[in-house]
Image (spheres, helix red, strand yellow):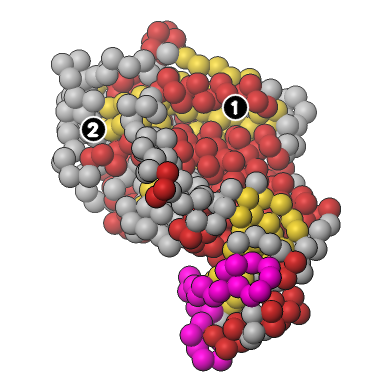
Amino acid sequence: MITLGSPSLTAHKAPLLALALGDTTELTAEARELDAALGGAIARASSSRDFRGARDETLLLSGGASGPRMVLLVGMGAVSDRPGALRRAAAIAARQANKLGAAELTWYGGELNEREVEAVALGLSAGAWDYTETKTLPPENERRAQLASATIAVADSPPLQRGLANGLALAEGHSLARRLAMMPGNLCTPEYLAGTAGDIAARHGLEVTVWGRTEMQEEGMGSFLAVAQGTPQDPKLIVLKYNGAKNGSAPIALIGKGLCFDSGGISIKPPQNMELMKFDMCGAAGVLGAIETIARMKLEVNVIGIIGATTNMPSGTAFKPGDVVRSHLGKYIEVVNTDAEGRMVLADLLSYVQRFKPAVTIDAATLTGAVVIALGHIATGVFSSDDALVTEVIDAGKRAGEPGWPLPLWDEYKELIKSDVADMKNAGGRAAGSTSAAMFLKEFTEGMPWIHLDIAGTAYSETDLVALPKGPTGVPVGTFVEFVRGRAS
């Protein structure tokens, strides 16, 4: 639970109060009052350079005779993006609260506007989040309390309440996406994703459609079904419709790759770190999280979320290198690498979505390891032939704290996916691997406004990110939501 409370810091009785400071921040009147109650400890820490306000720096002080028992100074560094800095500092404060066993937290970052309150609420939720569903609790005498409630110390007003409501909506979407991604593949199955979509629909009065193998066979989704033919689990095509605008208004389509586990199939992956391939459904998790948030925000726009969910497994019935399959669009695909499976699922989804005549289609997928080589774990790869759309999506990512970077999608790269026996092949080799994958997807967009996000480097982290623990990051929920908000305003 996150609420707004008095900016008078000495009035708060939470066991922990977090104070966010930049490297050149002057103490506000409220912070000076708190410092006086602490006997000048904050000013001394600053003047002695024990605390310099550098980004991610923390210093824990004992509280005074009254008020909070502990005061945590959190550094924001040189602030250029204030909402982003506040969000990060709030996430660090919440993580520290969990480590300290503080069930309640008061957070203060000076005067805040609506967007900044939204960022703080999202940061507090993100930092407090933890996945414990498959962990045994420690003995009761060894347990620490986990952060359960937080108060943002700021003067209350209707705009700030809107910011808080939007922040909580975003937090719900991020938490949902991170939970789905963190679940092991034997629990987060295609059936489970379909059930989650049904839960979202029931909560918000949305329309949901789920197809299985039989319906997809009748529809002629040969590319998607080729990936699914090696597993006994029923693949799922999931469609969620949110109608926030008038009927007939062209929807924004969000498409997510939902490979609940990717072994690579016959072209099997190396065993080291293969367990991380449970994260190959982060695109699908992002769609579900975004729809959850959009519905909570009640945005005045129509949105369709589409997910292709299955697993890619080696078996006697699995598709194999050299096979040729017919896609939903009617184009023939030569399979040269069964580990290039996500694009084959997306191909049929991109063809299928055209019946809804979307204003724009955005797909997100943990598609290629090559994008990690190109951009590392900082930026999402952004691909489109529409420069204005690229700018719009990258700007949405900036607002969400999910940076993206444009990569080329030129016709010359089409040579990489030429096939001797089919209309195209599903992989173009090591060179320009992310671009050749995007070129493959482009073949199924038939001129509709479309953009592809390769989130393989940003959807999850193998190391602790300071503001977030290792594991799922919530990308691309924020980019999806900010793009839709931009079209709704």
Residue in view at x 54 percent, y 44 percent: 174
Closer-to-camera residue (19/354): 19
Nearest to the observer: residue 403 or residue 69: 69
Q: Residue at x 29, y 48 (%)?
A: 369
Residue that mark 2 sits on:
263
Q: Is residue 64 magenta?
A: yes
What number of labels is visible? 2
> What's the amino acid at mark 2?
Ser
Residue beneath the point at 69% across and 23% down:
205
Residue 85, image quadrant: bottom right
**Considering depth in this image, is 344 or 288 the residue closer to the camera?**
288
Secondary structure at badge 1 equals: helix
Tell me if 60 is positioned left or right of 83 in this view: left
Q: Is residue 24 above or below residue 466?
A: below
Q: Residue at x 68, y 62 (%)?
A: 13
**Residue 88 tag number:** none
User: What segment is highlighted magenta in the picture?
Assistant: 46-70
Residue 213 rendering spot, x and y as whole percentages? 38, 12
Q: Amino acid at mark 1?
A: Ile
- Mark 1 = which residue? 200
Q: Is residue 262 left or right of residue 113?
A: left
Let me know if residue 55 is in the magenta part: yes
Q: Tag 1 or tag 2, which sits nearer the N-term?
A: 1
Q: Does residue 392 appear in the picture of this structure?
A: no
